[in-house]
Image: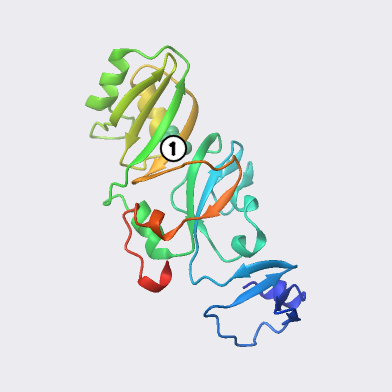
Amino acid sequence: MCRRLIESGAFAIDGVVHDNPRESLDARGLTFTLDGDLWEYREHVYLLLNKPEGYECSTSPTHHEGVHSLLPLPLAVRGVQPAGRLDHDTTGMLLLSDDGAFLHAMMSPRRHVPKRYVARTKHPVTEAMLQALRDGVLLRDETEPVAATDVTQASSHEIALTITQGKYHQVKRMVAAAGNRVEGLVRTAIGGLPMGDLAMGEWRYLTPEELLLLPYEAPASGK
Ligand code: URA
């Protein structure tokens, strides 16, 4: 818990304010209020956020607000990090956690965690473009072609595709290399977990069942 928050008198257990940050408390099963809002102690948090346009995933954002500003203070101050980045103009599914092992598992290039996107294109979708994405396209500064899987056409100017790498601007660069241009990008699933219903800009905790759909083995007590 953030020292300044505790010192400000915002932290209370059963209505009793605890404002000494050095006080040691048994965290197991602890519920507390922060500025009157009820919270339950969790060793780690695993969050799903529907990222809106115009937010940066960086912890030190430079040109736009950071995604942390969409989280309540008690979560923002406990050091949650996005599990991979979305561009400021990409919307959709973002996972955040303060569990380093989880973040590593989600982001490690060796794990090839699938990420599904829907891309709106400037020009009409063509069969040649879909095939190029399936076959693999060579991106600038790369030596090997990169291919997408489950590439489907969603409408005249929309495709869905899955990638298993996390290269910089990967979908936009792949679509450009296939002769089109991305004008809007939404991430709709990570691993076996779909975004589901969550309003833009909203967050929620992942359930233990949802965590099982991700390639991560959490320690029993951490879920
Ligand atoms: N690919 C991109 O081009 N941008 C993103 O934000 C994610 C994947």
Disc 1 is placed on an element classified as strand
Q: The C terminus appears in which quarter of the rendering?
A: bottom left
Q: Is residue 150 left or right of residue 75?
A: left
Q: Residues within 10 Å of mark 1 (few under 14, many from 20)?
A: many
Q: Label 1 CB, ligand 1: below 8 Å?
A: no
Compared with 181, 208 (above or below) is below
Residue visible at 77% across and 76% down in the picture = 9
Q: Which of 80 and 145 lies nearest the eye of the viewer?
A: 80
Q: Is residue 169 visible?
A: no
Q: Is residue 144 left or right of residue 83?
A: left
Q: Position of residue 14 (x, y in %)?
A: 70, 79
Give the residue at the far right of this rendering.
8
Q: Is residue 120 left or right of residue 17?
A: left
Rendered image quadrant of residue 144: top left
Q: Which of 63 and 135 lies nearest the eye of the viewer?
A: 135
**Residue named by callout 1:** 188
Q: Position of residue 171 (x, y in %)?
A: 39, 31
Ligand 1: give its quadrant.
top left
Residue visible at 64% across and 86% down in the picture = 22
For the image shown, how many numbered marks are present on the structure?
A: 1
Compared with 155, 209 (above or below) is below
Residue visible at 59% across and 53% down in the picture = 60
Q: Position of residue 109 (x, y in %)?
A: 30, 49
Q: Position of residue 147 (x, y in %)?
A: 26, 31
Rendered image quadrant of residue 16: bottom right
Query: Which amino acid, mark 1?
Result: Thr
Q: The N terminus appears in which quarter of the rendering?
A: bottom right
Rendered image quadrant of residue 101: bottom left
